Amino acid sequence: MSKKITISFSKSAKPKGGLAVLLSGKGGLISEAVNDLDPAGVSARAMEIAGFESKAIATLDILAPQDSPVDRIGLLGLGDPSELTEYDWLRLGGSIFALTQKSRKVWIFVDVPGVEVGAQNVADLALGMLLRSYRFDTYKTRKKDNAKKEDDGATSVTFVTTHSAAAKRNFVVSKAVAGGVELARDLVNEPPNTLGPVEFAKKASALEALGVDVEILTEKEMKRLKMGALLGVAQGAARPPRMAIMQWKGGKAKQKPLAFIGKGVVFDSGGISLKPGAGMEDMKGDMGGAAAVIGLMHTLAARKAKANVVAIIGLVENMPDGNAQRPGDIVTSMSGQTIEIINTDAEGRLVLADALWYCQDRFKPQFMINLATLTGAILVALGKQHAGLFSNDDDLSRQLATAGEVTQEKVWRLPLGSDYDKMIDSKFADMKNVGGRFAGSITAGQFLQRFVNDTPWAHLDVAGTAMSAPQTEINRSWGSGYGVRLLDHLVKANFEG
């Protein structure tokens, strides 16, 4: 959950106490508000001594002089504003939050002589602050001696800008995005003993408050639908599986929906093919794909997206019980295709197989995009800087790649093809669930492609980006919330209106 921040927008302000932040453009120009905040000219002297050159993302924290109405003055460099991207403005907002420290009141003077900082730029600054403010401390019981109440940590932030009215309107969307990312991060960070399939499904049902239609399929209903692939993964767990189907109907009545599908393995022990003990605790994040999907639905509903969207998450736990699935078992998926289980630790693709088939069969969507922390092999190939992209559709791939560049939730397309497909052919069934040591991420994509029919489809392997991701100006969390901003931008830029 984020540190409590209340954000407002005003054309003018008379700060008293706390922190005042001044943006500094190319050449060291700063807001004219400095004349009232620092009549003694301490800021200019501090900039000179520190060698502050107003480079982008550069900050300087100054103790305000005695005759200033505030306690501290913070300077934030913009560099050349004409070169700043949407993501750069988020980074700047994150850097502002880092300056706030324990300040309870913060004023950010946005207007700089000769620099046009528009309403959307201001909303992006605010979003960057919200994303950086996130922290997950639900289970920390030891408090600092001077922390009396949770509310003591609240920070009031006022953006002072000539575009205050427009920035306030744009912030409605920014706040929706922040809420979706926060939800996804919370889910990935939550310990597995408190977030089983049933509890996760309840998180999906909570979206009904935003106008999302939600159905929850139980084990009995999935058996009736013959989802043998998903149920095979769940059969060794004491906690029963669930499937959540979420629908947002913001588009035209007869418009085919956009579809997003998430792998929701709430904990992955590997099953009978047990994982090594070292690092297994990280497998609480093996539902990062489902977390991103539910976070996306929160964002789309909160900002009232003008699109019809369906989201499906398969929720299971993979455990090595006496009733667990065995290597050598053959299961029958909802599609009727049979799967030989070679390794029970390749379980996410089994969950997605039934979810993808159910989605295309019932909803006939414009496209399907699935997200899954699917393979360790993707980290070997791409590290933590890109998610792996596999697709049967060039247009959808290009749209995802563009959205990735804008949001810096980047993707990199890898190949699919018949030669790889042969690697998952089985002697005893229609296919096997792993294809051997080589091309592990690709053969996983080939497996999923067998369950999409002719629907345009993309698979995002987010094993390197959804959890334990690199720390940035807008993320200090183990669970990154990767995918929410990426897919929200995809929808907004290509499929609304």
Image: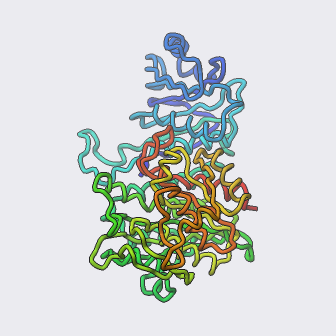
Q: Is residue 410 above or below residue 248?
A: above
Q: Residue 51: x percent and y percent?
A: 53, 13
The residue lying at 41 percent from left, 71 percent from top is 316
Q: Is residue 201 above or below residue 179?
A: below
Color encoding of the figure: rainbow
Question: In this view of the protein, can residue 147 be seen by the observer?
Answer: yes
The residue lying at 60 percent from left, 50 percent from top is 411
Q: Place residue 166 in its image quadrant.
A: top right
Q: Which part of the image, by quadrant, shows the C terminus?
A: bottom right
* Nearer to the camera, 2 or 424: 424
Judged left or right of residue 107, residue 324 is left
Q: Residue 435: x percent and y percent?
A: 50, 64
Q: Residue furthest bottom?
A: 224
Q: Is residue 25 above or below residue 217?
A: above
* Nearer to the camera, 39 or 315: 315
Q: Residue 426: x percent and y percent?
A: 51, 74
The residue lying at 59 percent from left, 66 percent from top is 421
* Nearer to the camera, 118 or 360: 360
* Nearer to the camera, 12 or 219: 219
Q: Residue 75: x percent and y percent?
A: 54, 24
Q: Place residue 284 in its image quadrant.
A: bottom left
Judged left or right of residue 147, residue 480 is right
